[in-house]
Image (cartoon, rainbow, N blue to C red):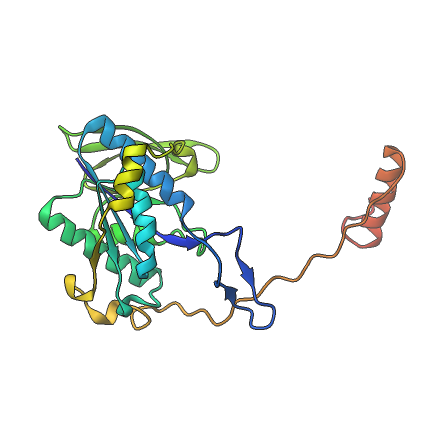
Amino acid sequence: MHLAVCLKQVPDATEVKIDPKTNTLVREGVPAIINPYDLHALEEAVALKEKYGGKVTVITMGPPMAVESLKKAVSYGADEAILLSDRAFAGSDTLATSYILAQAIKKVNEKEQVDIILCGKQAIDGDTAQVGPGIAARLGVPQLTFVMKVDAVDQETGEIQVQRKLEAVREVVRAKLPTLLTVEKSINTIRYASLPNLIRGAGYEVKVWGKGDLDLDETQLGLKGSPTKVSRIFAPPQRPGGEVIEGPPEVAVKNLVDKLITRDIIANC
């Protein structure tokens, strides 16, 4: 069984700041990490490989420095890693990104068919949850989103059964392979990398594919292929401090109700 994991390198959300003068993200000196949801996708892919056999290929699109994230993915148990990096890809929104990733998976399929594609449910920098479904739509494969558990993969019938996280219930779904999953953090617990894998990851030579290595329509790349435009980024205003109502509970409740009535927040019945 061949599993492909789409990873994204993102700025560490705990370190991100906004320049108050320019209202833009301050990226200088901010460490880059693998998107946390994508790490859970990778862990699930490695677990499925261990259970059913096969291999795991990780793919990311980004600048040359994203090689480090792919080496880390290899240290977690991935077998192969591919970086999609080209100046023509710069500025791609989720529509263009899903197109480039889908074309890369098509190229991987030429050598060995991918049975399951795994993505995190969303990236912590954009929070759109659009790239995974976009890849599935472009490849014409079923998409199983918000997956919190993979129950089984039946390689004889070519089917997978998963549990999806909905608002109040779990939904059990079966789909034909190949398929794409977007996963929740609750799907698993990420293990520490083993020493042999750490050594392999440190020395691994990541494959780099550019525009010329893929069958691409240039009108669907980068800014040219991205209908989404970000006009500005700004920090939300600070909330004013709240009001504390002192006194015994019965007095505090009465004073609170009086204030709410006075401000027309609730009606005086």
| Residue 7 in sight | no
- Position above or below: 58 against 239: above
Q: Residue at the spot x=45%, y=69% of the render? A: 230
195 left or right of 218 in image: right
Query: Residue 114: x, y in percent?
Result: 17, 43
Q: Is residue 193 visible?
A: yes
x, y percentage for residue 6?
29, 48
Q: Nearer the viewer, residue 202 or 98?
A: 202
Give the image location of residue 130, x and y in percent.
Answer: 36, 54
Q: How many numbered dots are placed on residues in this image?
A: 0
Image location of residue 192, percent across then percent down: 38, 33
Q: Which residue is depicted at the point 44% across and 56% down?
A: 126
Q: Quadrant of residue 148?
A: top left
Residue at image coords 33%, 65%: 92
Is 170 situated above or below 123?
Answer: above
Return the residue nearer the eye: 67 or 112: 67
Q: Quadrant of the C terminus?
A: top right
Query: Which quadrant is the N terminus positioned in?
Result: top left
In the rendered image, the vertical position of residue 192 relative to residue 117, given as above or below: above
195, above or below 25, in the image: above
